[in-house]
Image (tube, helix red, strand yellow):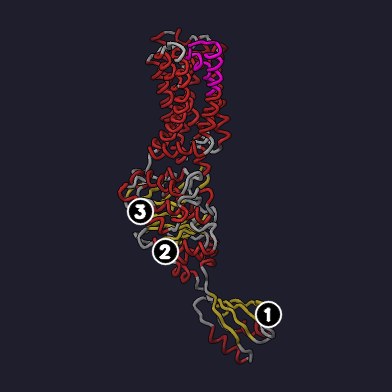
């Protein structure tokens, strides 16, 4: 369990993280979302004890990272943005070193080592120098490093950056698998990743927490404006004129011709009004057949953009 | 600590660094051994150790430049600092690894006195004393290099800065003679020292009261010295203050084969001070 309270980090005048608070419960995967430079990595560096906060507290399983750093750090596995690898070591040597500095009981080492090599699938490269590995394998060795010592909390900073699509899918399913046993914070600026893996999302922008909810709830909460696209077999001007006259329509825009003798239009309704029926009746009365009607769901991308432009702070 | 030590030691020999250090050291040492002992048929081995102290200027930066700076550049410091290791474990592990490489090199040079011993009777304990001094001197220089390496993430800057610092220590003795010795200059220097200490405290703690306190205590100490020890204390004060930093001055006893406690304690204290500063530097980076 991770408890972050009023976390603030100032670099001189610049505020990198501005009183951020959140809790991650046992066995939860939290997505940590934000544009580049929003303060994601800084927050993660503070949680793992790499740098200190200007104000605020971080507790890992109830242990304060500042007051008992050595004890708290035993519970954390951290994969930073750039995996911290020694290029002059082989994978095996490197993992041995990590086992030693994480003070893992030597009796447990053999079993854990086999388990980790198996989970992240790097058994076949264990004898190779890290500098000769591909980016994807380096990332996996970084992940393996975070798993050493079976920490209950995993902090993963953009774990899929620089991987090819196949590897991304593999790492994602791996994280999902790990989420069954570990408490995970996963940062990303790639949204599908977060909606695919995380149970809860927090969005951070310019150091401030701007949203915190499940991906579904976020879509629901922010996706209320009902937009839809229509394909109508009629000339553009007439269609727009007809639709404009329907009560409850807020906005109409032609989107172009995608099929001969038809026109695609985007229609936005007033909030809480379902205009699909009146749309159908109005167009059929004018003898303009509707070939297609599709409501536009807000993706996490839209929500993200909306949230960070609104700059509304959640309390 | 042991894990960091082992890793660091392995890193020296998995790259060229360890071999370059040993090779260069042994080349120069061998040259001087041949010139002083073999060609002149002299049994005075301590003269060789005394002559070759200048190697430290060149080889210590090679040994220490990457110790901390490479960690920061490779971002592996994130691994070390987020592991349950103490900062002092990290610093000591690295320091001892560098010292070990140095010690291994010294062990090879032990061949030279053994060669000499075939040709006559050697003053064994004198040589042992000389080695102890040589080792302590080198270890002190390594601690300076380690400290400087913790200040930058660039190996080249670390190497050049270490080289410069060692040169300054080298010429310290001749600099001291050029320093003013008057009482007034001594008092001014004391004032500068107090101001520097107060400023240092202010910049590390950002607490104006503590730094004013340090300044007041500092002034009080010097006033007390002036009143009770006498104004003579400030004559040549600058020179004496700088002489305290002269690592080479204290090596001269060892060179003669004398083994006294005070320089040994001095060298160990000197290294400890720089190791402590290294730990503080790492600590401070996390807070700024």
Mark 1 belongs to chain = A
Q: Are marks 2 and 1 in contact (CB under 8 Å)?
A: no
Residue segment shown in magenta:
B28-55
Q: What element carries label 3?
A: helix
Q: From the top left corner, tell me how far across and down residue A212 is, in percent.
A: 44, 62
Numbered mark located on residue A112 in the image: 3
Rate crowding at label 2 as few (under 14), some (14 to 19) or many (20 or more) other CA atoms within 10 Å.
some
Output the chain of dot 3.
A
Q: Is A171 covered by the magenta stretch?
A: no
Disc 3: CA contacts within 10 A as few (<14), some (14-19) or many (>=20): some
Mark whose residue sits in front, 3 or 2: 3
Q: Main secondary structure of the magenta part?
A: helix
Residue A176, numbered label: 2
x, y (%) of residue B62? Answer: 54, 31
Same chain assignment for discs 1 and 3: yes
Q: Residue B148 placed where, x, y %?
A: 51, 31
The image shows residue B260, relative to residue A243, as above or below, that is above
Foreground mark, 2 or 1? 2
Q: Is residue B8 above or below residue A221?
A: above
Q: Quadrant of the C terminus of chain A?
A: bottom left
């Amino acid at each position: 369990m991770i408890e972050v309270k009023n976390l603030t980090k100032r670099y001189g005048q610049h505020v990198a993280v501005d009183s951020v608070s959140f809790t991650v419960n046992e066995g939860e995967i939290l997505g940590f979302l934000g544009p580049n430079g929003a303060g994601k990595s800084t927050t993660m560096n503070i949680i793992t004890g790499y740098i200190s906060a200007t104000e605020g507290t971080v507790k890992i399983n109830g242990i304060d990272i500042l007051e008992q750093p050595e004890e708290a750090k035993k519970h954390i596995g951290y994969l930073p943005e750039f995996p911290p690898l020694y290029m002059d070591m082989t994978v095996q040597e490197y993992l041995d070193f990590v086992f030693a500095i994480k003070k893992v009981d030597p009796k447990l080492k053999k079993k854990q080592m086999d388990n980790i090599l198996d989970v992240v699938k790097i058994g076949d490269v264990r004898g190779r120098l890290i500098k000769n590995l591909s980016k994807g394998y380096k990332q996996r060795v970084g992940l393996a490093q975070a798993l050493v010592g079976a920490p209950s909390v995993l902090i993963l900073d953009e774990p899929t950056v620089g991987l090819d699509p196949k590897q991304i899918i593999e790492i994602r399913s791996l994280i999902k698998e790990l989420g069954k046993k570990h408490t995970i914070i996963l940062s990303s600026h790639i949204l599908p990743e977060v909606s695919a893996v995380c149970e809860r999302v927090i969005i951070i922008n310019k150091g401030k927490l701007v949203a915190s909810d499940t991906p579904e709830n976020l879509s629901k909460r922010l996706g209320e404006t009902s937009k839809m696209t229509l394909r109508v077999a009629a000339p553009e001007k007439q269609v727009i004129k007809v639709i404009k006259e329907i009560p409850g329509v807020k906005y109409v825009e032609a989107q172009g011709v995608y099929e001969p003798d038809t026109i695609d239009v985007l229609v936005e309704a007033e909030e809480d009004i379902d205009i699909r029926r009146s749309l159908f009746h109005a167009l059929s009365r004018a003898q303009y057949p509707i070939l297609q009607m599709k409501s536009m769901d807000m993706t996490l991308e839209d929500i993200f953009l909306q949230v960070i432009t609104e700059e509304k702070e959640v309390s | 600590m042991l894990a960091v030590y082992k890793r660091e030691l392995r890193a020296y020999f998995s790259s060229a660094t360890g071999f370059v250090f040993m090779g260069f050291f042994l080349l120069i040492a061998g040259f001087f051994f041949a010139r002083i002992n073999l060609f002149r048929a002299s049994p005075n081995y301590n003269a060789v150790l005394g002559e070759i102290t200048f190697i430290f200027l060149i080889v210590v930066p090679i040994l220490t430049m990457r110790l901390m700076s490479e960690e920061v550049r490779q971002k592996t410091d994130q691994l070390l600092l987020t592991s349950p290791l103490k900062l002092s474990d990290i610093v000591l592990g690295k320091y001892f690894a560098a010292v070990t490489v140095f010690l291994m090199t010294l062990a090879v040079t032990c061949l030279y006195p053994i060669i000499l011993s075939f040709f006559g009777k050697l003053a064994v304990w004198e040589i042992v004393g000389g080695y102890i001094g040589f080792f302590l001197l080198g270890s002190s220089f390594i601690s300076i290099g380690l400290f400087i390496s913790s200040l930058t993430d660039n190996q080249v800057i670390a190497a050049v800065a270490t080289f410069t610092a060692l040169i300054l220590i080298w010429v310290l003795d001749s600099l001291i003679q050029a320093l003013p010795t008057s009482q007034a200059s001594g008092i001014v220097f004391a004032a500068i020292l107090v101001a520097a200490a107060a400023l240092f405290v202010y910049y590390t703690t950002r607490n104006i009261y503590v730094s004013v306190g340090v300044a007041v205590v500092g002034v009080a100490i010097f006033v007390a010295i002036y009143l009770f020890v006498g104004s003579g204390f400030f004559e040549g004060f600058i020179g004496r203050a700088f002489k305290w930093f002269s690592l080479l001055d204290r090596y001269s006893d060892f060179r003669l084969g004398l083994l006294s406690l005070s320089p040994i304690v001095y060298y160990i204290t000197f290294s400890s001070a720089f190791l402590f500063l290294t730990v503080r530097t790492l600590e401070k980076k996390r807070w700024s």
